Every structure is written in structure tokens, then in C-alpha cells.
Amino acid sequence: MSPPPPTPLLDRVRIPSDLRNFSPEQLKALAEEVRAETVHAVSTTGGHLGASLGVVELTVALHAVFETPRDRLIWDVGHQAYPHKILTGRRDRIRTLRQGGGLSGFTRRSESEYDPFGAAHSSTSISAGLGMAVARDLLAPQGLGQGPEQAVIAVIGDGAMSAGMAYEAMNNAGAIKSRLVVVLNDNDMSIARPVGAMSAYLSRLISSRPFLSIREVMSRVARRFPRPLAEAAKRADEYARGMLTGGTLFEEMGFYYVGPIDGHDLDHLLPVLRNLRDAEESGPILLHVVTQKGKGYAPAEASADKYHGVVKFNVVTGEQAKAPPGPPSFTKVFAQALIAEAEADPRVVAVTAAMPGGTGLDAFEKRFPRRSFDVGIAEQHAVTFAAGMACEGLRPFVAIYSTFLQRAYDQVVHDVALQNLPVRFAMDRAGLVGADGATHAGAYDIAYLGCIPNMTLMAAADEVELTHMVATAAAHDAGPIAFRYPRGEGQGLDLPARGTVLPIGRGRVLREGGTIAILSYGTRLGEALRAADELAAQGLSCTVADARFAKPLDTALIERLARNHAVLLTVEEGSTGGFGSLVAHHLLHQGLLDGGLRFRPLTLPDTYIDHESPRKQYDLAGLNAPQIAQAARDALGHESDARPARA
Ligand SMILES: Cc1ncc(C[n+]2csc(CCOP(=O)(O)OP(=O)(O)O)c2C)c(N)n1
Ligand SMILES: CC(=O)[C@@H](O)[C@H](O)COP(=O)(O)O
Ligand SMILES: [Mg+2]
């Protein structure tokens, strides 16, 4: 590994107040040091490099001009906040990013007073910022809060601007007219290439208005924020500008639009931000900065994804560490299985909300460009869009991370399930996901979908099961159906060319035993089998079954397991309120817990599990084989207390 580069200026900065007396030339040099430090740190940890490199100058300028942490600086998503972390007292831990016990890969209130709002899911910054601005306006006259001088700045990317929530916030901000600065960081990239009319609009905006010269920007800002200027004159000014330039969507929504300006040029950023900071006038402002994702690091600039998310890499060559060749990921298996279904059925279509690579739909899109839809970061729309397609006889698959489907809950209930529309939900990243931590854990979908009438729910125990579930979903026109599978590799099992349609609501028994029954839902099945081996070695015979379905439950199987064993464990990679609760509900209704059966639902704990390796995360959750075996022994207690098993 190459040694970190010398950083004489950065060494003088522990917190932002240390850089506020730097000259512009020193700030430029500091930015280069921050960039080099970011590259070096991420080369040792992996993480979201490209977005962070694109905001180095912006980060330096914002901290130089604004009085953070009094002034609230909110990073949308938070994946671009590594330079911010370096400058806000966390440089000493920057090489622990995304590692167990280390810094989070996103902003987080509990991590630093310089992170006023936690994030990781996108497009929340304007809403949160507006809330803070309103709090300031209400509290300051009472002598409470941070005082009337406090600024609130939300930095949001062009990709994040595709989400409805950003517009809901701007709509509200334009009406409330609180003092709020929104910095639109436009790098013409989402994770993949940005899509949609808004992205095209931003591109037109940039090309129709070449970078404003600094004189032009300053004169516009001065025109907008004069000390005494009559309201009517200001309006006339706005209309005049609108007529000259065609206005912008942001102006129509009540924002004062400034830009576009070069987001890498501190000679522009610093004076413009100072002017916006000192504006006496209230009302929201949108500063449009144009940046380059991956800026200043040649391998990132040259790559198609601009190094959005990288593993450890060689700083000199940019070459990322190659994992030893392993079995295909669940994501890849899903994509291949969906392509197989789509080959056979022209009604199969696929929808992603800005995650074509992450969900495997990039492969589907190559094969079926007209049947693949990337709707941008718009999970709510994705679901209702699919509902509309289902109304007309298409067979839509919404390929989505479990954690992002949370955004579209009412759409799932109101638009899909209530109308019993056959939308297929392919939920990737089910369970714990490793370095992204709690914000990205697919922890809740079993619970939040399990309570919805008409839903059919499946979880794949391995990649072969996943191909069967894709086929089952494709064939299922009776109503909505969802299946979940985890991040990462499968087991390397031989895959069928096409999956087999499974009987709805039927599980399978993998091992017959006597005393203990383990009923697994999802990929903990392997751990359940290992636990059974351990228990068998101790003379405790186990039945192991794969439930396949959480809804409808295989009630016959559950009743048989309950009647014939002393202990019944359920195991799932989901929160409380999920599969185990559905099983408990059934057992209670059947009176099967009245006779001494020792039932133990093993779920994720009722707490957030931080970034760690998945293996350690599951250890913390108590869902690895030794812990499953221990739970069985604990439940069994003393042999004499336990109800004798019948089989
Ligand atoms: C609700 C939600 N959907 C999807 C994602 C996944 N995601 C993380 S960053 C990103 C792209 C964001 O693009 P942009 O805001 O332009 O930031 P950039 O990476 O270009 O700096 C996406 C889709 C997310 N974090 N949250
Ligand atoms: C920031 C964000 O939301 C994504 O970039 C996410 O980190 C991707 O996760 P995967 O690596 O699991 O696709
Ligand atoms: Mg972007």
C-alpha cells in the first residue's frame, strides 16, 4: 500500500473553524490535500468514493463560509460526506469507514455534532432542512435555538432530485418562504446514468446557461438581495429575468435560482456562498453547482460508474481488489431467471428505481430494452406504475431493495394489494447487508408485507429456490406476490435453465427428526442445518424444514411440526413481527401452544445493527448455527421439563 501523501495544511485542521482564516489559495491547496486523503483512506476501506471526490471543493467552501456546526449542513444520502468527515473532527478515524466499530459510511447524528441529520436513503435533505429553518424562525424570537443568524444548507444531488420527496419539500419551501439554501450538486450521474425528464431538464438548463461569470453571479445576487428594495420592484426583476432566460422550474416553485456555477472553482464558490449567507431577505435559494463525479482521481473519472461504490483498490493504478471467483450472486441469479421467464412470456416486464446494476436489471435491459424501466429514485412511482401495468395484463416485476420498498408502503397497500393486482416484488438485499449498516438492512419487509391481505410472500433458501420463486411469481396472476433474497453469493448450486412453479403455501422438509423442529424462512436454512448437525452430535434429533412461504403459511406442516416435537424454532432474517409472529399467531389460534410445546421465534433483534461483516452481524443477531443450536437447547431446558416428543 502506498503511504498517505503529505498534508501540511490539512494537518492544521481538526475542525472547520481551523480553516476559516485560510486564504483562498490555501483553501485550494487544502482541497487537494482533502482529495488525496479521501482517495487514500477509501483505498483501504472501500466505500462511496466518486460522490465524495466530486464535492471536495464544495465541502471546503461550505465549511469556510458557514459557521458549522451552528449552521446546519445537511448532505442528502450522506454517501458523499467523506471529505466532510475528514474536516469535522473525524480524520483520525477515516480509515475505519464502514468497518465494524468504525465510522458510518453516511452522516449520522450520533457520530458528530457536524451531522445535523442522518441519512443514507435519498432525497430527504430539503424536507429536513426546511424543518430546521422553520424551527429557527419560531425559536429565535423566543431567545431559543441557535438564533436568527443560523443558516440551513441542504446539499442534494441531481439523482436525488428525481424523487418525489424533493418536490414535496420544494413545494412547501416555496410557500413557507423560510431562509434555506439548497445546493443542487449536479454531476449528471446517479449510481448509473441519470434518467428521466428532470435529468434532461437540468442538462438543458446547464447548456442553455453557460457558467455564469463571477461578476454576473454577484450582480444577480446583489439585485436579488438589496437592502431596501420594494417588493414590486423585486417581482419586476424576477419577471424580467424570467422573460430573458425562460425562468427555471425552481423559480416557478418559489426559489431564487443562482447558477449554474462551477462547483470545483473556489474563486466562484466562496464569494457566491458568502453572498447567499449574508442575504438579508428570507426565502429559499437554490444554488446550482456543476461538478464531476470522481473529480481529480483519474481512474474514477475514466470509469463508467465514476467509482460510485468501490472495494479496496490500488491508489496508483485504481485497480480494485478482486474477490476470488465464487458462485454467482443472488442478484445475478435473479436477473438470469427473470430473463428466462421474459423469453417465454412477452408480458413480463421489469421496473427499477435507479438501481439497474444493484438489482441485476442492467442485464435484463440489455436483453429487453423496451421491457425494462428505470424510473429514477422514485420507489413510490415504481410500485404504482407497475400496478397500472398489471391492470392491463402485463406481468410486472418491481426489482427493489427491501429497504427502499419501505418508501412505497402505501402504494403497496392501496394501489396494489387492495385491488389485488398481480405485481411481483423481487426484494433484493433481504436481511443484513454488511458495510452499509442499519440504514440498508432489509429487516422489515416480512413484517410490513405479512400483515397485508392478498399478499403472497416467499423467501428463497438458496439460489435454486430463487429461480423457482421467479417462475412462481411470473405464473401468479391471482394477486400480488413478493419474494426476498439476500445480498451476496449463492452456494454455487447447479441452476435449472428455468425455474419450476412452486405450489403456493407449501414448505418442504429437508431432514426428519424427533425432538426439535427448526422451521427456516430464507437463507438461514444452511445455518439451521448446521445447527441440526451440532444438536444431533449431542444426541438431540432435529427436523429441519424450509417454509418457503410466510403467506399463506403451510399450516399442515406447522401443525405437524408442533404436534410431533418438544421444541419448535422458527428462524428468519427479519425483524420481530415477521414469519415467527405469523407462525405464533396460527399456533395460538389452533391451541397448539396450550399443551407445552416450546416455541421460540428467532428473528433479528429489536435494535439497529451497525455496519460490520455480515457474518459478525448475524452473530450479533444470534442467527448463526451455534446460536440456533443454543436456542434449541435453552428451549429444551432440562429433559424432564420438556414435553416428551411423539416421534
Ligand atoms: C430512497 C433511495 N433509493 C435509492 C438509493 C440508492 N442510491 C444511493 S446514491 C444514489 C444515486 C444518487 O445520485 P445523486 O443524488 O446524483 O448523487 P451522486 O452519487 O451523483 O453524488 C442512489 C440511487 C437510496 N440511497 N435511497
Ligand atoms: C448509497 C446507496 O444507497 C447505494 O450506493 C448502496 O450503498 C448500494 O448498496 P449495494 O452495494 O448493496 O448495491
Ligand atoms: Mg449525481
Image: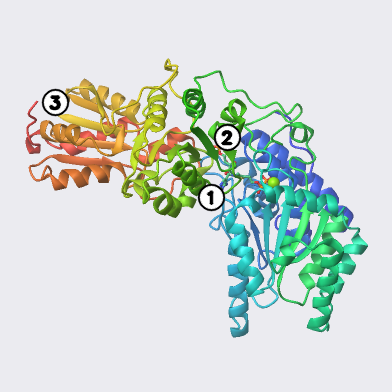
Looking at the rendered structure, the kind of residue marked 3 is: Gly
Looking at the rendered structure, the kind of residue marked 1 is: His
Who is closer to the viewer here, 30 or 547?
Answer: 547
Q: Secondary structure at mark 1?
A: helix
Q: Quadrant of residue 305?
A: top right
Q: Which is nearer the N-term, disc 1 or disc 2?
A: 2
Report whether 328 appears left or right of 94.
Answer: left
State if disc 1 and disc 3 touch (CB < 8 Å): no
User: Which quadrant is home to the N terminus?
Assistant: top right
Q: Residues within 10 Å of mark 1 (few under 14, many from 20)?
A: some
Q: Which is nearer the N-term, disc 3 or disc 1?
A: 1
Q: x%, y% of residue 338?
A: 48, 27
Q: CA distance from mark 1 to mark 2?
A: 15 Å
Looking at the rendered structure, the kind of residue marked 2 is: Ser
Residue 381, numbered circle: 1
Looking at the image, is 223 positioned above or below residue 25? below
Q: Residue at x 15, y 40 (%)?
A: 598
Q: Which is nearer the N-term, disc 3 or disc 2?
A: 2
Q: Residues within 10 Å of mark 3 (few under 14, many from 20)?
A: some
Q: In front of the other: label 3 or label 2?
A: 2
User: Which quadrant is home to the C terminus?
Assistant: top left
Which residue matches tag 3?
514
Q: Residue at x 84, y 78 (%)?
A: 226
Q: Secondary structure at mark 2?
A: strand
Report whether 629 appears left or right of 74.
Answer: left
Q: CA distance from mark 3 to mark 2?
A: 49 Å
**Residue 255 seen in render:** yes
Looking at the image, is 161 positioned above or below residue 434? below
Which residue matches tag 2?
372
State if disc 2 and disc 3 touch (CB < 8 Å): no
Q: In front of the other: label 3 or label 1?
A: 1
